[in-house]
Image: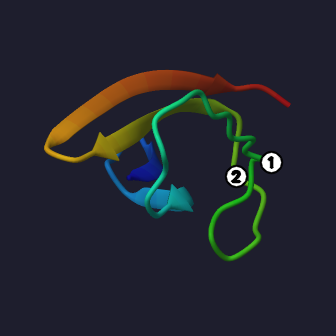
């Protein structure tokens, strides 16, 4: 399983979670920083959740 955030240009911003999980509900909090610790701009981002052979892609809005 991997949970990643991308900007609208398709560039990976950060990987929030990576690894195996048991079935169940989980949550993740993104503090608005990229993988270098730099605060990103407000705007629209995409997140992907890869689980096995399934991929879920959704939009999110970051407001400061």
Answer left or right for 31 relative to 42.
Answer: right
- In the picture of the structure, the residue carrying the numbered disc 2 is 40
Marker disc for residue 31: 1
- Determine whether 24 is above or below 53 in the image: above
Q: Is residue 20 left or right of residue 44?
A: left
Residue 62, percent from left and from top: 69, 29
Quick one: quadrant of the C terminus? top right
CB of mark 2 within 8 Å of CB of mark 1?
A: no
N-term mark: 2 or 1: 1
Residue depicted at x 55% and y 24%:
60
Could you classify mark 2 by the number of other residues whose Cα lies within 10 Å: few (under 14), some (14-19), or many (20 or more)? some
Mark 1 element type: loop
Residue beneath the point at 45% across and 22% down = 59
The image's colour scheme reads rainbow
Residue 23 image position (x, y, % from top left): 46, 35
Across and down, in percent, residue 53 comes to: 13, 44
Q: Residue at x 43, y 34 (%)?
A: 46
**Residue at the farthest right position:** 64
Query: Where is 6 relative to 47, above or below?
Result: below
Q: Nearer the viewer, residue 64 or 51?
A: 51
Numbered disc in front, either 2 or 1 = 1
* Residue 55 in the image, given as x and y percentages of width and height: 23, 36
Crowding at dot 1, Cα within 10 Å, few <14 / some 14-19 / many 20+, comes out as few
SS at mark 2 in the image: loop
């Amino acid at each position: 399983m991997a949970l990643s955030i991308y900007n609208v240009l398709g560039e990976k911003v950060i990987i929030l979670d990576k690894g195996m999980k048991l079935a169940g509900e989980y949550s993740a909090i993104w503090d608005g920083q990229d993988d270098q610790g730099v605060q990103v701009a407000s705007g629209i981002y995409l997140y992907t959740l890869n689980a096995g052979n399934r991929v879920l892609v959704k939009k999110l809005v970051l407001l400061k």
